[in-house]
Image (spheres, rainbow, N blue to C red):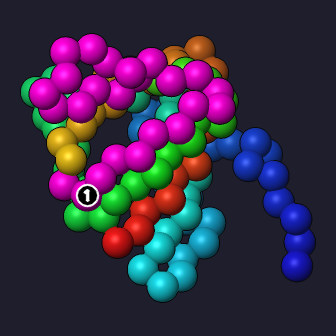
């Protein structure tokens, strides 16, 4: 077993977010997401079949949930639980540095 670091070998592709599965077991997926200025396109909402618990490790980002007026600005150490089928969107991610997320998807 080799130890790995979530901040080493960050993707350099700034055109799209990079999703890297770290662990998959019994209907659960743990992944690292690296964003570099990406956001959900205007007018679109994300909606997933599985619940998601997400932790912001570095950078900054803002999430918006359907029915809420204000976006939630996240800084390193902030986490949020997104229930299955909850409509939400990424309003923005830091374009000057990688925003690294740790996301746990489960049923």
Residue shown at 79%/45% (left/top)? 8
Q: Work out which quarter of the rendered image holds the C terminus and state it.
A: bottom left
> Residue 2 location, x and y as percent?
89, 72
Using the image, determine if residue 35 lies above or below residue 33: above
In the image, is 1 to the left or to the right of 9?
Answer: right
Q: Was residue 54 drawn as part of the magenta stretch in this picture?
A: no
The verdict on residue 83 being magenta is yes
48 lies left or right of 82: left
Q: Secondary structure at mark 1?
A: loop
Name the side, left or right, on which 62 lies relative to 101: left
Q: Nearer the viewer, residue 37 or 51?
A: 51
Q: Could you classify mark 1 by the number of other residues whose Cα lies within 10 Å: few (under 14), some (14-19), or many (20 or more)?
A: some
Coordinates of residue 103 in the picture (x, y in percent):
51, 52
Residue found at the far bottom of this picture: 26
The residue closer to the viewer here, 58 or 67, is: 67
| Residue pointed to by mark 1 | 84
Q: Position of residue 9 (x, y in %)?
A: 75, 47
**Where does the magenta region start and end?**
62-85
The answer to whether 22 is drawn above or below residue 80 in the figure is below
Residue pictured at 49% horizontal, 46% vertical: 54
Q: Quadrant of residue 91?
A: top left
Q: State whether residue 13 appears in this view.
A: no
Residue under the point 34% across and 47% down: 82
Q: Position of residue 61 (x, y in %)?
A: 47, 23
Q: Decide if residue 79 is on the left or right side of residue 40.
A: right
Q: Check the image and report above or below for 36 versus 104.
A: above
Q: Is residue 69 visible?
A: yes
Image quarter where the N terminus lies is bottom right
């Amino acid at each position: 077993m080799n130890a790995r670091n979530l901040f080493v070998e960050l993707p350099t592709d700034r055109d799209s977010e990079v999703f890297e599965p770290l662990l998959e077991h019994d209907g659960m997926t743990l992944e690292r997401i690296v964003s570099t200025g990406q956001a959900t396109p205007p007018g679109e909402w994300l909606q997933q079949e599985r619940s998601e618990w997400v932790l912001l490790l570095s950078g900054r980002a803002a999430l918006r949930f359907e029915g809420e007026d204000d976006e939630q600005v996240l800084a390193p150490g902030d986490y949020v639980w997104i229930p299955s089928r909850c409509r939400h969107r990424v309003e923005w991610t830091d374009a000057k540095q990688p925003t690294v997320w740790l996301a746990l998807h489960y049923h």
